[in-house]
Amino acid sequence: MKLACNLYVDGEFEGTIHSEKEVNIGKNGHVKGEITTHRLVVQGFIEGAISAERVEIKAQGKVQGSIESAELVIEAKGLFEGNSLVKKKERVLEKEQKTPQINKS
């Protein structure tokens, strides 16, 4: 699933999610697969690989797998089992600068 908008999952999903904005996994959400997004908020359960600028695991959230992010926030009672790789802000900025921009004049 490839999106240019926010996504809220409060059920079961298996597969790949690519969103340019925010992905929110609700309390009843269960995602198995890969998530690539700007910001991820986890209140449910994720199994798989995550790549995001910012990942927030809330009190009832659980992640099993790998997280690659510049910011990782885990609230009290939030669970994370797996590997974490911190993206450097420089890499994020380099990617943004390489993205072609169209100027409307």
Image: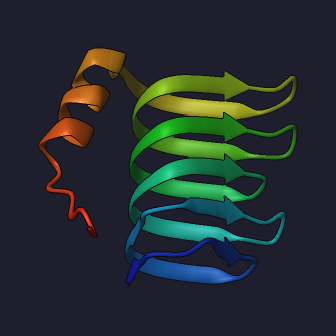
**Can residue 67 be seen here?**
yes
* Along the line of sight, the residue nearer the viewer: 42 or 39: 39
Quadrant assignment, res 59 = top right
Q: Residue at x 86, y 29 (%)?
A: 77
Among all residues in the image, which is located at the extreme front? 105
In the image, residue 101 above or below residue 58: below
Q: Residue 3: horizontal and vertical position, in percent? A: 43, 79
Image point (81%, 71%), residue name: 28
Q: Residue at x 54, y 75 (%)?
A: 5
Please state the total of marks drawn on the protein image: 0
Q: Quadrant of the C terminus?
A: bottom left
Going by the image, does 43 lie left or right of 93? right
Residue 37 point in image, percent of width and height = 44, 55
Q: Nearer the viewer, residue 40 or 20?
A: 20
Q: Quadrant of residue 102?
A: bottom left
* 78 to 42, vertically: above or below: above
User: Residue 68 placed where, x, y %?
Assistant: 36, 33
Q: Is residue 26 left or right of residue 47?
A: right
User: Which is nearer the eye, 80 or 4?
Assistant: 4
Q: Is residue 88 visible?
A: no
Question: The N terminus appears in which quarter of the rendering?
Answer: bottom left
Q: Is residue 19 left or right of residue 90?
A: right
* Coloring applied to the structure: rainbow
